[in-house]
Image: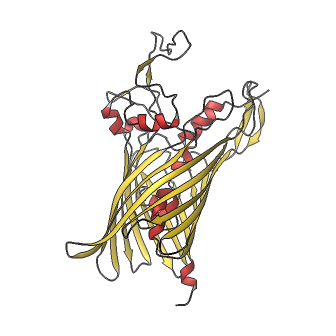
Amino acid sequence: MRLFFLKSAILFSAFLLLFFSTAKSQEIGEVLGQEVNTITTAVPFLMIAPDARSGAMGDVGVSTSPDANSMHWNPAKYAFVEEEMGLTANYTPWLRSLVNDINLSYLSGFRRIDELQTVAASLVFFSLGDIQFTDEAGNPQGIYRPSEFAVDVAYARKLGEFISGAIAVRYIHSNLTQGQNVASMETRPGRSLAADVSAFYQRELNWVNTPATFAAGINISNIGNKISYSDDWNANFIPINLRIGPTLKLDLDEYNALAFSIDFNKLLVPTPPIYQRDENGQVMVDDDNRYIIQSGKDPNRGVVEGIFGSFSDAPGGFREEMQEITYGFGMEYWYDRQFALRGGYFHEHENKGNRKYFTLGLGLKYNVFGIDFSYIIPVMQRSPLENVFRVSLSFDFDAMGPQ
C-alpha cells in the first residue's frame, strides 16, 4: 500500500512561504514571553512575489507604477498603464539554500482596449522538485514531482480621472499527492476558484517645488473556496489577503526619478486557536471528540465568516492581530527611464513567521526589451532565504512601432 502523508505535504507546501528565519521552528510555545502562532494556508505559492522589480523593493507593489506584473499586486493598476500592450516572463529559483530543484515561473501580459479599459492574463507555475514517495514501512514507491499552478484573467477600468477598479478571476490547481493513497483513502489534486477586487488612485502634484506623482492602492486577493485533497480530509483556506499602501514618485529633473513605496498585508483567514492540553501535553477533546479551545475561536468556519472574523479571532487579542500585519518598504531610482536601482526591506513579526530581509536589485531597459534582477539578504543567519534571486524579462511592444 502506497502511503503519502497528506497533512505533511500540505504543511510542507505552506512552509515554503511561511518559513522561519531561524534554523529551528517551534509549535505554539513561549518565545520572548509571547506565543508563536503562525497562520498557514493551502497553496501559499500564491503569496510569493513573482517578479524581480517588486522583489527588489521589499515585496511591495500595490501602488507602484503600473507594469505587466500588476496582476499579482493590484490588477486595477492596468487601467493607468502607458503602453498599449506588454508581456513579462519571470523566474525564481526558490529556497536554494535548502534544495536545488524548487522554482517559481510567472508569465503575465496585458492589452489596452481603449483609454479607459485594459484586459490582462497571467500564469504562475510552482514546482516542488523531486520527492521520493514511500509506503508506511519506508519502502520507496517512486519519485514524483508535485506542482501547483494558477491561471488569472482580469478586467481593469478607469472610474474617473484619478481612480480605477478591477476584478480578476483565478483558477488554482494544486497537485501535491500525485494520486497516492493515504491509509487506503484516495487523494486528488486540490482545486479552487478565486477572485481579486482592487482599486488604484494616481494623481500628479507638486511636492516641495518638485513634480511628483502620488498613488495608493488596495487589493483583496484570492477570495475563493477552500481546497481539499480528499473527501476524507477537512478543506483548507487559500491565502485570502488584504494588501494596501501608498507610493510617492519624485521627478527630480529630466533624467532622474525617485519613488518610495510601502505595502501592508494581512491574511483574511482564521488565526489558529490555543487548545487546552492535559498534564502530558496532549490536546484535550470534548464528548464529541472535538478539540477543546482554551483561547481564540474555532478555525473551522466558512469563507465569508473567516474573512470578517480574521480581524478579531487571534488568541492574544488586538496585540496579536497587529502582529499579523506584515509590511514592506521599497525605493526605486530611475535614470533616463533606462537604468534602475532598487532596494527595500520586508518585516514579519517573529511570532508570525519571522521573515525579515533586505532586498536589492537593478533594472535595464533598452528599446523593446527590459531585464530586472533582485536578491534577498536575510537579517538572520542560516535562513532558508539565503541565495534567493529573481530575474524578469519584459517586452514593450509599443517600441516596435514607428518612432
- Say which quarter of the image contains residue 123: bottom right
**Position of residue 211 in the picture relative to residue 129 (left or right):** left
On the question of residue 107 being in view, the answer is: no
Q: Where is residue 104 drawn, in percent x and y? A: 59, 54
Q: Quadrant of the N terminus?
A: top right
x and y percent of residue 171 in the render?
63, 50
> In front here: 275 or 385?
275
399 is higher (above) or lower (below) than 179: below
Using the image, determine if residue 347 lies above or below residue 81. Answer: above
Residue at image position (49%, 44%) is 240
Q: Is residue 246 visible?
A: yes
Residue at image location 49% in from the left, 41% down from the top: 18
Q: Report the front residue among 239 and 77.
A: 77
Is 296 situated above or below 146? Answer: above
Task: Tell me which corner region of the image, top left, top right, bottom left or bottom right, holds residue 130.
Answer: top right
Residue furthest bottom as drawn: 403
Residue 303 percent coordinates (x, y): 52, 37
- Of residues 161 and 345, the one drawn nearer to the viewer in this rendering: 161
Q: Residue furthest front?
A: 159
Whole-percent x and y of residue 288?
56, 12
Describe residue 269's horizontal placement relative to residue 96 as left or right. Answer: left
Q: Is residue 193 left or right of residue 294?
A: right
